[in-house]
Amino acid sequence: MALIQMGGGILDARGSIGGQVFSRNRFGNYIRARTTPVNPASSRQNAVRTAIQSLSQRWANVLTAAQRAAWEVYASAISRQNKLGAAIKLTGFNMYVRSNTPRVQAGATVIDAGPTTLTLPPADTVFAGTVDETNQEISVAFDTDLDWVDQDNGHMLVYMSEPKSAGVSFIGGPWRYAGKITGDSTTPPTSPQTFSVPFPVAQGQVVAVRARISEEDGRLTDLFRSQSTVAA
């Protein structure tokens, strides 16, 4: 299904209608033929699908009416953007799944109680991920003054892109989960932290590292990222 913006004709469209796909890149709007993507049913894809399915069942069968109502209130306070850039509101169910799917993927505790702070947490403006060939590791620098660092159930979830050839200016994925940094109210984590790379890398390749923060009340930031060249 496509989203269409009207006004003296069609001003913008995103998505598919029939055999055509409408989208936009840095050169402007374009239309291409619709193709059926390959579904390799990889273990990573299946893990995400299983997480969404389990959260859907949990919403229906485990959460209390009060908990579902709290997620509805939280969702109604948060504005998101659709593919056309228009402001939209998610349902409480969608916000619950959005907030908890990364936690399930990372092996963190699912948060059933709806957040009472009606804003998204701030992104980490200090965040930087660098990758080196020798150790095949990602080094993640982060702001140790953010709230999640002192929360026992707060996490920074880190993902790395498939490496690209030197000269590539923008990387859009594919992405793989690399690991999480967990907050601690007694001994907070220090910056930087390191992870093994989920894709093998070589010197001179270009890699993007992105992350999001999940606070102890279940609130999840938007993605933030950094991009760098693989060092020796």
Image (cartoon, rainbow, N blue to C red):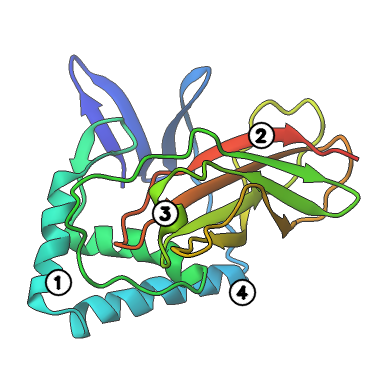
Q: Which mark is residue 227?
A: 2
Outermost residue on the bottom side: it is 61
Residue at 58 percent across and 54 percent down: it is: 158
Q: Nearer the viewer, residue 190 or 181?
A: 190
Residue topped by disc 4: 43
Which amino acid type is shown beneath numbered disc 4?
A: Ser
- Relative to residue 184, is residue 141 drawn left or right? right
Image marks 1 and 4: residues in contact by CB distance under 8 Å: no
Q: Earlier in the sequence, mark 1 or mark 4?
A: 4
Q: Earlier in the sequence, mark 2 or mark 3?
A: 3
> How many angstroms separate mark 2 from mark 3 (CA)?
23 Å
Q: Secondary structure at mark 2?
A: strand
Q: Nearer the viewer, mark 1 or mark 3?
A: 3
Which amino acid type is shown beneath numbered disc 2?
A: Gln
Which amino acid type is shown beneath numbered disc 1?
A: Gln
Q: Is residue 104 above or below residue 90?
A: below
Q: Earlier in the sequence, mark 1 or mark 2?
A: 1
Residue topped by disc 3: 148
> How many angstroms separate mark 1 from mark 2 (CA)?
39 Å
**Residue 64 place in picture, x, y as percent:** 13, 79
